[in-house]
Image (cartoon, rainbow, N blue to C red):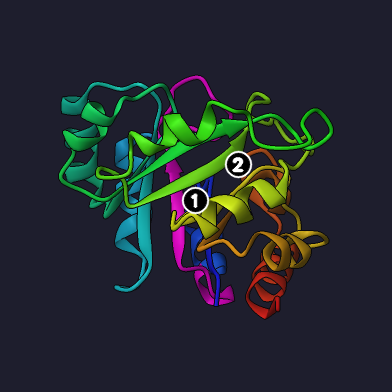
Amino acid sequence: MVRVKICGITNVEDALTAVEAGADALGFIFVENTPRFVTPARAAEIIRALPLFVTPVGVFWDHPAGHVKAVAETCGLRALQLHGDETPDDVAAHALPVVKTIKLAPSDDLGGLPPWTFAVTQRYRASVAALLLDSTARWSEGERRQPIEWQVARNMAAARWRIVLSAGLTPENVARAVSIARPYAVDVNSGVEASPGRKDPDKVWRFIAEAKGAR
């Protein structure tokens, strides 16, 4: 069964709703000047309320390793998501498991995998726990983003990558995305929001049910 990460958590209520609905991981965005930024102190408060077997993931973007380590220790993070231009050496500097984001053009702009992507991702083979496939489109401020090409994700999963599928996922399309891409996990943010930084409980419940029920 596919795992589900609900990202962009900013408050305890949304965190517990996601957990009750069956989320396996919650994402906390520590990228300053973005709509769902949380301070380490705020994230720590939320994470203390989580049950033992739900994984808190910290999202960073080209932050120094020392800063990432300090935030992780303050908050009790158990995994990292690196969303910027971090190199394999940057990834290897972290003690926690790392999910490295790889950005692809939306499906309307690209009919297949860019020729450089397999070569680029291969450099991370020894240093990452998983690859998160996201869109090159800038982070959403509430509007829906175009999904990436799901067959690309399936091809990479077939190449023995642990793939986390992101970008443009909603309760309406996630089951089809999972059936096509066969990812290890799916990651959603704006697709289950009522407004930036505030989740819609109905969308969260429907998204997780559709993802985990996909065949």
Task: Tell me the SS state at disc 2.
Answer: loop
Residue 173 sits in which quadrant?
bottom right
Q: Is residue 41 above or below residue 2?
A: above
State which tag comes first along the sequence, 1 or 2.
Answer: 1
- Residue 115 is situated, as x and y percent measured from the top left of the image, at 59, 28
| Residue 23, magenta (yes or no) | yes
Mark on residue 21? none
The residue positioned 72% from the left and 37% from the top of the image is 112
Tag 1 residue: 11
The residue positioned 53% from the left and 31% from the top of the image is 117
The residue positioned 48% from the left and 54% from the top of the image is 159
Tag 2 residue: 197
Labels 1 and 2 touching (C-beta < 8 A): yes
Residue 161 sits in which quadrant?
bottom left
Q: Is residue 39 above or below residue 3?
A: above
Q: Identify the magenta region.
A: 19-38
Task: Tell me the SS state at disc 1.
Answer: loop
